Image (tube, grey):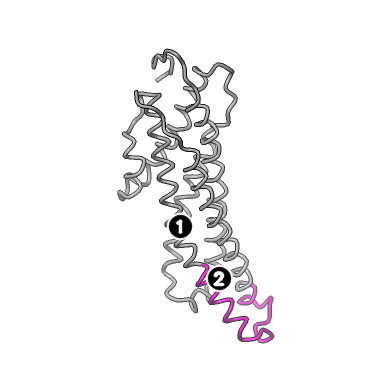
Amino acid sequence: MEELRPNDQRARYAIAMIWVILFLNTVILIMSFIGFMINEGYIPSEDMPEFLIWLYVAGIGYASILVLLAAIASIITFIMWFRRAYYNLHQKVTTLSYGDGWASGAWFIPLVNLYIPFKIMKELYQKTEKYLSFNVEEPYKGNLKTNYVNLWWTLWIISSFSIRLTWKIEDVDQAGANPLILVIGAILQIALCVVTIIVIKDYSDAEKILIEERPEELEYGLIPP
């Protein structure tokens, strides 16, 4: 059995990038809501200076570009954390469904990416919970419940479709004409960010125990299949 590899720093990097995305989407949400209020006539557009209208439209455009760049960085840091977590669990449990390479590769295969990453995340939670419950000296009282995992994946699927819808907006002028789409998309992204941070932090806390635990003799039969 190989040594487990530290993963706490990767978790921190992944969470930090998600906080950046959350902040940028909060900015987009506020600006898009203002645009929605203008479109619906709650804020008279004729009373607004032209430079404020330009600032609103340009601000959404630039913020969207920053979100895209942050999302690329976030995908990289998340997958690095995700694969390392699955690799570490492989060193403790022999009954996992996939090799650790699937924790990164599955995200880039059409249709496969709609299911396998979710199954791997559930395995991380469930198998780690079982392992710690059977092998740590003190009774394990962690928080590895899959409710957040289910919510995380549901939000991921929905927000992915909403992003595709937003990308169909051809230019910033059209974005200004469709603020409700941006409002809904930003709300979904913010919710996804919050839940993803919870999922990473909960598992990272349990993984620290997994890495620190050094039972003298490990029998894999102690872990129910």
- Residue 106 location, quadrant: top left
Q: Secondary structure at mark 2?
A: helix
Q: Position of residue 124 (x, y in %)?
A: 44, 33
Query: Which numbered dot is residue 109?
Result: none
Q: Is residue 157 left or right of residue 101?
A: right
Q: Which residue is mark 1?
A: 71
Q: Is residue 126 left or right of residue 30?
A: left
Q: Nearer the viewer, residue 100 or 26?
A: 100
Q: Is residue 86 above or below residue 136?
A: below
Q: Position of residue 63 (x, y in %)?
A: 52, 68
| Badge 2: residue crowd in 10 Å (few <14, some 14–19, many ≥20) | many
- Residue 99 location, quadrant: top left
Quarter that holds the N terminus: top left
Q: Is residue 85 above or below residue 26?
A: above
Mark 2 and mark 1 lie on one chain; the one further toward the N terminus is: 1
Q: Is residue 179 above or below residue 192?
A: below
Q: Amino acid at mark 1?
A: Ala
Quarter that holds the C terminus: top left
Q: Nearer the viewer, residue 106 or 208?
A: 208
Residue drawn at the location 51% of the way across and 53% of the way down: 17
Residue segment shown in magenta: 37-63
